[in-house]
Image (cartoon, helix red, strand yellow):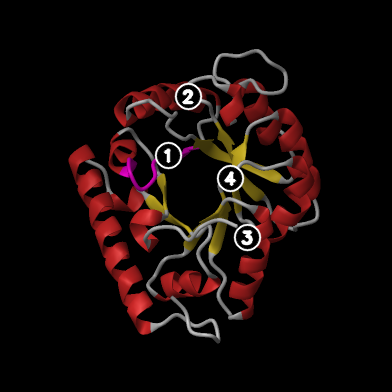
Amino acid sequence: MTDRDGTVRPDRRAEIAAGLAQVRARIADACAAAGRDRATVTMIAVTKTYPAADVLALASLGVHDMGENRDQEAAGKAAEVAAAGVRPRWHFVGRLQRNKCRSVVRYADVVHSVDSVRLAGALDAAAADRGRPLDALVQVSIDGDPSRGGALPGSADPDVGLGTVAAAVAGSGALRLTGLMAVAPLGWEPERAFARLAEVVAAFRAEHPSATEVSAGMSGDLDVAIGHGATQVRVGSALLGMRPTLR
């Protein structure tokens, strides 16, 4: 994929460009089918397991939003990209442990996976010295399975109820509540999952009308997610090819 000096090879750049063209066409078609303006949907390139050179190639092709799932990989990659003079908008989209918050706020512009009051508090404390707000989305559980993460709609749980988590983010000093994130549950058809998410979003916006972002949809189901109102889609393999093996 890359030469020894870390630069992307021309054939790899061409491969990424082809994947990008296909994904952009899918997003445009999905927006047209839903009667939506293409400008209302942001594509986040999820670069987990891919090298910094791929990030630089994406940036050179006009992609400005990059997503990462694991801090131990993302922190070094963000530093490498910055050293090359490129500063994309970094989205942390994976499950976040409270002890990783101080590292994540050093490079992330957006965190998509706030799913508890305790995590919101830890992230708020870590971001206090950033000098600018950290955008935060509350991850919502569509199926109510606590093992998969996500705040619980309709729950009065003081730590993981969606209402209490959203209130904690909205009332924090260093975070800015921008919307909701969700992943379609295993075994659910995308249509069912994102239709349910749209119901949650409608109720959520009644309480937080300025938090309009909906991060939903990945390589296999982004079309359906856009049809149900997603404003951000997180795309990895459809854009960059099969993932390298995690070590």
**Badge 4 amino acid:** Gly
10 Å neighbourhood of mark 3: few (<14), some, or many (≥20)? many
Relative depth, front residue between 175 and 189: 189
Q: Which residue lies under the disc numbered 1?
A: 216
Q: Nearer the viewer, mark 1 or mark 4?
A: 4
Residues at marks 4 and 2 touching, judged by CB atoms closer than 8 Å: no
Cα gap from disc 2 to disc 1, whole angstroms: 11 Å
Q: Earlier in the sequence, mark 2 or mark 1?
A: 2
Part of the protein shown in magenta: 211-222
10 Å neighbourhood of mark 2: few (<14), some, or many (≥20)? many
Cα gap from disc 3 to disc 1, whole angstroms: 21 Å
Name the residue at 74% across, 43% down: 123
Q: Which dot marks residue 74?
A: 3
Q: Is label 4 in a helix, a strand or a loop?
A: loop
Name the residue at 56% across, 14% down: 154
**Badge 1 amino acid:** Ala
Residue 13 found in image quarter? bottom left
